Amino acid sequence: MLNNIQILEFSTGLTFVTDLLLIINTGSIVHGFTIPPSLTLQNVNDIEIYSMKIDCKVTSRFAHNVITSRAANRANVSKEAFFEVELPKTAFITNFTMTIDGVTYPGNIKEKEVAKQQYQTAVSRGQTAGLVKASGRKTEKFTVSVNIAAASKVTFELTYEELLKRNFGKYEMFIRVNPKQLVNSFEIEAKIFEPQGISELEAEASFVTNELLPVIKKSFSEKKGHVSFKPTLDQQRTCGNCTSSLLKGDFTIKYDIKRDTPGDLQIVNGYFVHFFAPTNLPNMPKNIVFVIDNSGSMSGREIQQTREALLKILKDIKEEDHFNFILFESVVRVWKNNLVKATPENVTEANDFVRGITAMGGTDLNGGLMKGIEMLNEAYETNAVPRRSASLVIMLTDGQPNVGVSNLAQIQENAKNAIQGKYPLYNLGFGYGVDYNFLEKLALENNGLARRIYPDSDADLQLQDFYEEVANPMLAEVELQYPENVISDLTQNNFKHFYDGTEIVVAGRITDNDLNSLTANVKAQGANDDLIFTEHADVAEMTKALQEQEYIFGDYIERLWAYLTIQQLLDKRMSAQGEEKGNLTAQALDLSLKYKFVTPLTSMVVTKPEDEEIADKPIEGTNVLLFHKGKPIDGDPHFIISVPEKEDAICFNINEEPDVVLNLIRDSVTGITVNGQLIGDKNSSDVNSHNTYFGKLGIILEQLDIKLEITPKKIILQNGRKFTLFTWLDTVNLQQESLTLIINRKKNLMLSVGDGATFVVVLHQVWKKHPLHQDFLGFYTLDSHRLSERTHGLLGQFFHHIDFSILEVHPGSDPNKPDATMVVKNNTLTVTRGWQKDYRKDPKHGVDIPCWFIHNNGAGLIDGVHTDYILSSMF
Ligand SMILES: *[C@@H]1O[C@H](CO)[C@@H](O)[C@H](O)[C@H]1NC(C)=O
Ligand SMILES: *[C@@H]1O[C@H](CO)[C@@H](O)[C@H](O)[C@H]1NC(C)=O
Ligand SMILES: *[C@@H]1O[C@H](CO)[C@@H](O)[C@H](O)[C@H]1NC(C)=O
Ligand SMILES: *[C@@H]1O[C@H](CO)[C@@H](O)[C@H](O)[C@H]1NC(C)=O
Ligand SMILES: *[C@@H]1O[C@H](CO)[C@@H](O)[C@H](O)[C@H]1NC(C)=O
Ligand SMILES: *[C@@H]1O[C@H](CO)[C@@H](O)[C@H](O)[C@H]1NC(C)=O
Ligand SMILES: *[C@@H]1O[C@H](CO)[C@@H](O)[C@H](O)[C@H]1NC(C)=O
């Protein structure tokens, strides 16, 4: 499974959904958004990973791993921090969270289609994210990068789970280590709990030096194993004074368990798992047909490596085994007409044959495979092979069929009909030219599996290794049986062969709540006779024993069952059609969502956290002049102009329709412009609602080629052609040339230009489910002295000079609010004493500011009439 994260750079024409950050997929493209993006060039060196912890808990082969990486941006500008992990291909991601400056962005599992739609809503125009390629044989790379603000910290936490497979007699867990820098606190810790008891435990690192060797600590006793690796900063150095890290490579933990009984049955919380791996049984003779592609594409190193591998395999083949070679290119050639016993003479002859294999021609895969199957069938029918033996077909190919039958579906059909479930077909796909998907389907439909052979110098070893895995069949036709009336949802319980050094795992659900004990029978054919193994588990005893173990994570059997079930459903789905495929998909999806596994059917969507109440934090600033959007119930933007010389203020409203854009400040000398767009209530058809607020503000800094668009949802900074998105959930402190932008999460935004123009925008959030009101903005000018005398606009015209005199105060229509005669700008106006709210210090309730209210949209106070300030658009 491929787990990629790719972050999109923003470019023109994107719309943003502020609550969607990243989508984590398995197997394909991933989409994401930067948070909060930076304006500067990235320099990874300023990001210090100060802590990295890899925490593994294994309970009964089921591993739960948490990787936590903490990094700090030591620079005074924002920087990009990378989180890169290589995961085993067999693992499922179950959780991913980022914590940036104390705010946690959680990952939520979603159906892939739903995530895709969410992404498509987020991006209005076709924008594709890049694809990160699979990085290794056993691992896939997972990469996330985020921009973090100056002097800020980020924590990444990734969780994945997998069932450890037994191979060559050991369970193996490996961790790819590559922090790329010295890490102050680096630690790998693994805690293993195996109810059957641990028999051996190894831990090694490919990068280990003599000095580092004692740092790897491992111990086990009875059921518990412990591994830890905690190198100090100095121990991580590649040399005495070096700053490069030698921690680069694989950290591998291998263990096996005691096997006093052939199997082990465990029951916890309504689920059971049955591990079955008998030891000390005689090997069964095997009948093996090698179907080898020697078409032209194999020529050169590939055919040479194939020859070498086959020669080594011939050395290991046992005398009681039967075997044969089928070669296919444009024609099909057999070594012998029948299976041949692996007597020393026959093996010697086989060696000569193998040495003479050359490559040429096309690829008649169907012909070769059919011939091989036919030969095995015939051997059975003529009793040419022992009755108790394990038969298998191993096919190796590097290309796609192009001679004979080349329709892949037809080949699948042919193979299925010919084999009829009698023996497994193993497909080895050599190199990248193969249709691996087809090989996998073909193998899975016939009880086998497919394996990739990577075209490397060790390809022969890879082939040989695969052979070793199946070299020692001990049992055939293995069937694990459970009392039907007490269990359900059983995973696969029939297996063609059991090979030495491996393990069979079956899990299921217990349907009988009052079950006291469970008995399992395993029937199989052995080398000498038919065998029955019986396993018994006492529920109460087991529950008690497991509860006492601190290592256990509660629902491991249930998760193990879900993991196996999903894997098997996905395998079956590969070759299913129509309604059956739909059913399998639905089941696998259901389980992936329920157990939160990132599978090919699901995505993990990393979102912004749920909104909380807005906290109150006063902004400091001199009270020079301010304009401010009033509280929702009053309606319409309120402008307050503070007149310090008079220790008093003037205020007025502008009554206009939603969507109208008003010019607030325009200074042609400094090139600073501020415009505001009105919004109404949610239900504008409501006749009682005439309220308007500022729903969008646009600030243009011509000389810096910067535009800032602010809404209650997002803040978009456009610097030339570069767009940067922030949300009100971000905490940002951005300094660039003569510009400072500070976003105080969920509260306000401060923009300073040069040393004499500072504006503050306050976010007003209303209750989300409020029937009428919606979020809006307030705008304040803290400092305007750098703006020129020519500054105009609804607010700007008052920046440099405003004087007024109150001639006579007299009772007005409202007994609490006296009227007065005011002379301002040579006009004599009747004004009313009132209050307006200043929300800078108390964003929730505001502070009442007494002021003289000018009626009729500020008529007589503002130059011209208010409609002179209406613009056709924001920018
Ligand atoms: C950031 O750091 C650099 C290098 O130390 C310094 O030159 C620059 O003035 C600093 N910028 C700010 C905004 O503090
Ligand atoms: C995911 O990890 C976060 C951080 O540790 C944790 O708070 C959250 O509960 C986890 N989610 C699930 C579904 O386990
Ligand atoms: C390490 O650095 C210190 C201080 O710079 C110096 O005195 C010492 O000789 C260096 N050691 C080595 C091994 O280079
Ligand atoms: C080769 O195998 C055949 C068939 O099993 C067997 O009869 C014959 O004796 C073997 N040949 C040699 C030379 O061992
Ligand atoms: C698919 O599921 C439906 C409903 O569960 C069932 O009726 C139908 O038989 C299933 N079809 C196949 C092909 O499994
Ligand atoms: C909007 O207001 C009108 C008039 O008051 C009312 O009939 C209608 O139900 C309201 N719609 C919503 C969605 O609240
Ligand atoms: C006020 O009116 C007087 C006399 O009409 C005029 O001289 C003066 O320029 C006016 N001042 C302003 C600010 O319009």
Image (cartoon, rainbow, N blue to C red):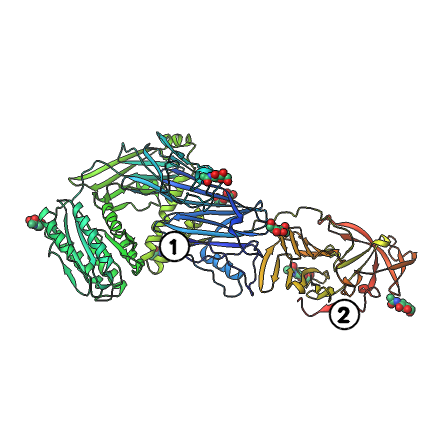
Residue that badge 2 annotates: 868
Q: Residue at x 25, y 40 (%)?
A: 522
- For the C terminus, give its image quadrant: bottom right
Query: Looking at the picture, how far across and down is residue 511, in whole percent?
Result: 37, 41
Amino acid at dot 1: Ala
Residue 732 can be seen in this image: no
Residue 134 is tagged as: 1
Q: Nearer the viewer, mark 1 or mark 2?
A: 1
Query: Looking at the picture, how far across and down is residue 536, in whole percent?
Result: 30, 34
Q: Residues within 10 Å of mark 2 (few under 14, many from 20)?
A: few
Query: Looking at the picture, how far across and down is residue 708, in whole percent?
Result: 64, 61
Could you tell which of marks 1 and 2 lies nearer the N-terminus? 1
Q: Residues within 10 Å of mark 1 (few under 14, many from 20)?
A: some
Q: Quadrant of residue 836?
A: bottom right
Amino acid at dot 2: Asp
Q: Quadrant of residue 760?
A: bottom right
Where 819 falls versus 319 (above or below)?
below
Mark 2 vs ligand 7: CB under 8 Å? Answer: no
Query: Looking at the picture, how far across and down is residue 199, in whole percent?
Result: 31, 32
Residue contact at pointers 1 and 2, CB within 8 angstroms: no
